[in-house]
């Protein structure tokens, strides 16, 4: 189920942004994800202050060459994946 547009994503307990060999990483209790490009832009905004809608609007401006619907679908899919991996929580 995709996250609600007015919810505010934040990193789940035990997860944090880190760096390894000058590569940004999302560190989770049992694994790590290498972040770059759009994935890094998304996770950096998962601070509990930005809503999902704000994240979408920000990235639609940055990636304006891609269609707005494509950007929105990709972001919602990535947020849902991170939630499934227990890396993100959402608050209304």
Image (cartoon, rainbow, N blue to C red):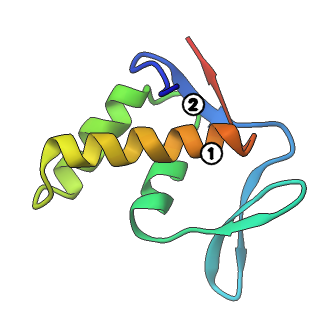
**Horizontal and vertical percent for residue 57?**
25, 37
Residue 46 vs 9, above or below: the answer is below
Q: Secondary structure at mark 2?
A: strand
Q: Label 1 vs label 2: CA separation?
A: 10 Å
Which mark sits nearer the N-terminus, 1 or 2?
2
**Of residues 41 and 80, the one drawn nearer to the viewer in this rendering:** 80
Residue 37 vs 69, above or below: the answer is below
> Which residue occupies 70% across, 88% down?
21
Residue pointed to by mark 1: 82
**Horizontal and vertical percent for residue 3?**
49, 25
Res 84 seen here: yes
**Horizontal and vertical percent for residue 32?**
76, 66
> Which residue occupies 17% across, 49% down?
61
Residue pointed to by mark 2: 9
Give residue 34's quadrant in the image.
Answer: bottom right
Give residue 89's quadrant in the image.
Answer: top right
> Which residue occupies 63% across, 34% down?
10
**Which is in the foreground here, disc 1 or disc 2?**
1
Q: Secondary structure at mark 1?
A: helix
Q: Are marks 1 and 2 in contact (CB under 8 Å)?
A: yes
> In the visual, does 71 lie left or right of 31?
left
């Amino acid at each position: 189920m995709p996250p609600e547009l007015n919810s505010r994503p934040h990193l789940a307990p035990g997860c944090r942004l880190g760096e390894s060999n000058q590569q940004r990483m999302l560190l989770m209790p049992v694994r790590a994800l290498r972040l770059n490009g759009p994935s890094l832009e998304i996770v950096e905004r998962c601070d509990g202050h930005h809503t999902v809608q704000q994240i979408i609007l920000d990235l639609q401006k940055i990636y304006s060459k891609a269609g707005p619907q494509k950007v929105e679908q990709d972001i919602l899919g990535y947020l849902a994946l991170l939630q499934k991996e227990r890396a993100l929580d959402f608050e209304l």
